[in-house]
Image (tube, rainbow, N blue to C red):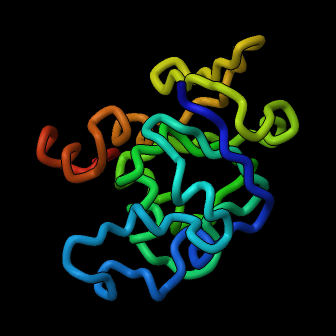
Amino acid sequence: MPRIWKFGADVDTDQIVPGRYAPYMLKEGQDVKEYAFIEARPDFAREAQPGDVIVAGANFGCGSSREYAPDALRRRQIGAIIAPSFARIFFRNAINLGIPLFESAEMPDLVGDGEAVEVDVVNGRLITATTTYQLPPLPDFAADVIRAGGIVRYVRENGRFPGE
């Protein structure tokens, strides 16, 4: 069953994937997903599974605008990221890649690291063994892009960008 991975505030893109693990620096056959949080939290790099949920403090994804940081999380098939706030460039890169992001100031205090969880992106719910939490809705454009599986698929299906 998927589980929660908790992080503090101000997690920057260099913590998510250090620059030396950029895709263009990797050897043939290596995947950037294997280096997600490799130094900041090595157990994540070894153990994170598809559907796992990241719950973090404010300003998640700050720092440089490297798209390979959210791409590593997409490749790991993270089910969602929940934080009080996100760096704007990270937010847009993650949404464009199809990663559901939810802004919630309360959630970091309500759930525990390693807790078994299920995320219902469509209905905006986080479900633990004891409680179902309602998550704030995604902005309409973000929900449309997430439903499509990312901005590329959205444009292919709709022939335009959201809101046009």
| Identity of the residue furthest to the right in this view | 109
The number of discs equals 0
- Residue 72, horizontal then vertical, whole percent: 41, 62
Along the viewing direction, whichever of 133 and 49 lies nearer the viewer: 49
Vertical relation: 134 (above or below) 37: above
Along the viewing direction, whichever of 149 and 118 lies nearer the viewer: 118
- Residue 157, horizontal then vertical, whole percent: 13, 39
The residue lying at 59 percent from left, 55 percent from top is 44
Along the viewing direction, whichever of 116 and 80 lies nearer the viewer: 116
Could you tell whether 92 is left or right of 13 in the image?
Answer: left
Vertical relation: 38 (above or below) 112: below
The residue lying at 61 percent from left, 21 percent from top is 125
Q: Quadrant of residue 5?
A: top right
Could you tell whether 15 is left or right of 93 in the image?
Answer: right
Vertical relation: 139 (above or below) 24: above
- Residue 88, horizontal then vertical, whole percent: 58, 64
- Residue 138, horizontal then vertical, whole percent: 54, 36
The residue lying at 43 percent from left, 39 percent from top is 50
Vertical relation: 94 (above or below) 157: below
Q: Quadrant of residue 81?
A: top right
The residue lying at 62 percent from left, 56 percent from top is 43
Could you tell whether 84 is left or right of 5 in the image?
Answer: right
